[in-house]
């Protein structure tokens, strides 16, 4: 086993770099920085989930620059950018700059008033020395007024720039959590949501559902990937429109979706997912280009409910077993798995 310092050594990193480049070349994927960084993480073999996903893409014959781009957003970007502390820094900066602008504005007001009063007093003064002294004071104040004025406009510009940055940041953060095709949460974001749900005192139980489109390979072969993509989007929309706002829906991978149902017992989850399964099987598709009807699709589901000893993986694995049973028993059905008694 290598230590941290070994892992940072030029020799170790150099070897990984070479392996990464060779790996990309063997797959005929250009070694652009994004593809390279995923390849590097893959060779490094530390982010288990990333390694698993790369292998899945490879098995499906779908490992290309687009797949690596997707994995980059999901795994690499989030590894190197600490989004939470970045957001806090930006928010602090906005708050501090905001206070500085308010302070500058108040100072400006005070100077304006002071100037007014000084001008009035100047009229009443006859002594030339005092008059010229007050005049110079007044000029000085005017230049301070101008300086504060320009400071205020500078700070306002900085604020506007920070707001643009914050908007961009929110966009990146959203993209890192989002599946590009469907707009649903991605696998990483799902796990974060699960952890938050478990910590939430208002959540008493969670039922997890995993759903997979049946015979989708055949569907793609018959109708092409573009129509396959549209079907995936339609499935996502159907899930969204039939679930509550507190439910979490994610695209877990290719044609696989994972749903978290907080405060939902297993039996109620079964009824709900059966209902959705039926709606999905009744969706009618028409090829816009040819106006011809396309085969409808079905989905199989597996469900499990959170138990005291569970973590995300054990809960998911049980639901996945349920899904496997649904597939084995003929597809287009919902099965649940309960923990084995020992
Ligand atoms: N169009 C499209 N197809 C995808 C996408 N992701 C995965 N797929 C396809 O989904 C298919 C999944 O195939 P399999 O895992 O063999 O499963 P299946 O054919 O659905 O069969 P069962 O799951 O056993 O019912 C593969 O052909 C993938 O190419 C995607 O984003 N778009």
Image: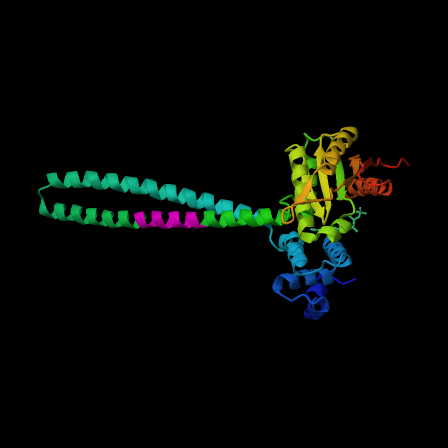
Q: Give the residue at the far right of this rendering.
A: 342
Residue 218, compared with residue 11, is above or below; it is: above
| Quadrant, the N terminus | bottom right
Q: Give the dominant element type of the magenta stretch: helix, strand or loop.
A: helix
Residue at (28%, 39%) from the top-left corner? 110
Total count of labels: 0
Colour treatment of the image: rainbow
Is residue 243 at least partly visible in the picture? no
Is residue 126 at least partly visible in the picture? yes
Q: Is residue 31 left or right of residue 1?
A: left
Nearest the viewer among 272 and 95 is 272
x and y percentages locating residue 185 in the rendered image: 65, 44
Nearest the viewer among 280 and 201 is 280
Is 212 in the magenta? no
Residue at (24%, 47%) from the top-left corner? 141
Residue at (73%, 47%) from the top-left corner? 255
Q: Is residue 111 left or right of residue 71?
A: left
Nearest the viewer among 313 and 216 is 216
x and y percentages locating residue 201 in the rendered image: 68, 31
Is 159 in the magenta? yes
| Quadrant, the C terminus | top right
**Quadrant of the rendered structure where residue 210 is?**
top right
x and y percentages locating residue 280 in the rendered image: 72, 38
Residue 275, compared with residue 313, is above or below; it is: above
x and y percentages locating residue 322 in the rendered image: 83, 39
**Quadrant of the rendered structure where residue 38 is?**
bottom right
Which portion, as a residue range, is magenta? Answer: 149-161
């Amino acid at each position: 086993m290598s230590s941290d310092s070994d892992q940072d050594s030029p020799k170790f990193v150099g070897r990984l770099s070479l392996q990464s480049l060779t790996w990309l070349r063997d797959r005929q994927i250009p070694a652009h920085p994004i593809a390279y960084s995923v390849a590097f993480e893959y060779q490094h073999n530390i982010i288990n989930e990333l390694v698993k996903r790369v292998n899945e893409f490879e098995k499906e014959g779908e490992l290309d620059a687009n797949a690596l781009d997707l994995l980059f957003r999901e795994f690499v970007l989030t590894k190197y950018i600490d989004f939470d502390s970045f957001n806090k820094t930006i928010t602090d900066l906005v708050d501090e700059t905001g206070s500085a602008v308010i302070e500058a504005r108040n100072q400006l007001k005070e100077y304006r008033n002071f100037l007014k009063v000084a001008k009035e007093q100047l009229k009443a003064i006859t002594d030339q020395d005092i008059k010229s002294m007050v005049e110079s004071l007044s000029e000085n104040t005017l230049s301070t007024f101008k300086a504060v004025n320009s400071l205020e406009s500078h700070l306002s510009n900085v604020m506007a720039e920070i707001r643009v940055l914050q908007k961009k940041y929110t966009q990146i953060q959203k993209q890192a959590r989002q599946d590009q095709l469907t707009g649903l949460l991605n696998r990483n974001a799902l796990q974060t949501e699960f952890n938050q749900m478990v910590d939430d005192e208002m959540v008493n139980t969670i039922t997890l559902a995993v759903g997979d489109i049946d015979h989708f390979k055949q569907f793609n072969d018959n109708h092409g990937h573009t129509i396959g993509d549209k079907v995936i989007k339609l499935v996502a929309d159907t899930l969204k429109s039939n679930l509550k706002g507190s439910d979490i829906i994610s695209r877990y991978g290719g044609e696989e979706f994972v749903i978290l149902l907080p405060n939902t017992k297993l039996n109620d989850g079964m009824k709900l997912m059966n209902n959705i399964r039926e709606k999905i099987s009744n969706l009618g598709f028409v090829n816009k280009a040819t106006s011809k009807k396309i085969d409808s699709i079905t989905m199989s589901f597996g469900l499990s409910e959170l138990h005291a000893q569970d973590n995300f993986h054990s809960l998911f694995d049980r639901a996945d077993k349920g899904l496997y049973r649904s597939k084995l028993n003929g597809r287009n059905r919902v099965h649940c798995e309960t923990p084995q008694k020992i």
